[in-house]
Amino acid sequence: MRPPRTPLTTALSLAACSLLLAGCSAVGDGENPEQAPDRSSEPVNGGRVEPGESEPRETLASQDVTDNGADLHIAIHELARRGETVELTFSLTNTDSDDDWSFAGRLAGVNILHEDANTVAAVELVDPVNSKVHLVARDSEDNCVCSDAPWGDILEPGDSVLISATFGAPPEDVSAMTVRMPMAGSFNDVPIG
C-alpha cells in the first residue's frame, strides 16, 4: 500500500515537474542549442561608455577631488530647463593611475545596502534667488529620477561615466543655480540652459 500524499510531497512533485518542463523548453522552438542566438541581457561593454569620435561635451563647471583614495574629475555639462523640471548632466572620471573608485553610496548619501546606494540621490540644486534647496525628483514608487550605476559600483582608472538627475524647476527668473554633491562640495553659478 502506498503512503498518503501530504501537501509537502505534492508541492515538491509540482516543483520537480515545473523544472523538467522548463528544461525542455529552455532551448526554444526546436533550435539547435549550438546555434541558438545569445539572448543575454547583459550589454557587451558592461554599461560603460566606450570612447568615440564625437566632440567633447561643453563643461560649465568642474573640479578635481580625491575620494576613497582615488583622484576624480567631476564636470558639470548641462543644467537644462525642460518645462517644470531641470535636468543636470555631469560626468565623473577616475583620473587616478592606480586606484579604482567605489561608487557605492558616495553620491546617494546612504548606506551601501540602501536601494539608492548606486544613484545620485544626494545631489542637490540650490536656488540662490529664493533660498530653496531642490532635491532629486522621485517617481510614483519613490525611486530617484536619476542615473544609477549600470556599470557596477566600481570606476576603474581612466574610466568615465555620464550621469543625469532630474529636479523640480525653479521659477523662470532664476538663471543659475548651485550644484551641491557629497564629496565634491558646491559648483556655484551653474547657468540654466
Image (cartoon, rainbow, N blue to C red):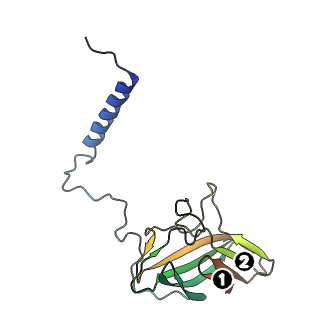
Q: Are marks 1 and 2 in contact (CB under 8 Å)?
A: yes
Q: Residue at x 37, y 60 (%)?
A: 41
Screen quadrant of the N terminus: top left
User: Amino acid type of disc 1?
Assistant: Ser
Picture coordinates of residue 118 (x, y %)? 52, 66
Q: CA distance from mark 1 to mark 2?
A: 9 Å
Screen quadrant of the C terminus: bottom right
Q: Quadrant of residue 178?
A: bottom right
Q: Is residue 84 visible?
A: no
Camera-nearest residue between 11 and 146:
11
Q: How many marks?
A: 2
Camera-nearest residue between 128 and 37:
128
Label 2 element class: strand
The furthest residue to the front: 69
Residue underneath mark 2: 126
Camera-nearest residue between 170 and 134:
134
Picture coordinates of residue 33 (x, y %)? 20, 52
Q: Is residue 109 visible?
A: yes
Label 1 element class: strand
Q: Residue at x 18, y 55 (%)?
A: 34
Rendered image: mark on residue 186: 1
As drawn, is 7 to the left or to the right of 109?
left
Q: Nearer the viewer, mark 1 or mark 2?
A: 1
User: Amino acid type of disc 2?
Assistant: Val
The furthest residue to the top: 1
The furthest residue to the right: 130
Picture coordinates of residue 65 (x, y %)? 54, 85
Q: Residues within 10 Å of mark 1 (few under 14, many from 20)?
A: some
**Up-down relation of residue 111 to residue 181 (above or below):** above
Q: Quadrant of residue 188?
A: bottom right
Tell me which label, 1 or 2, sits earlier in the chain.
2
**Up-down relation of residue 140 to residue 52 (above or below):** above
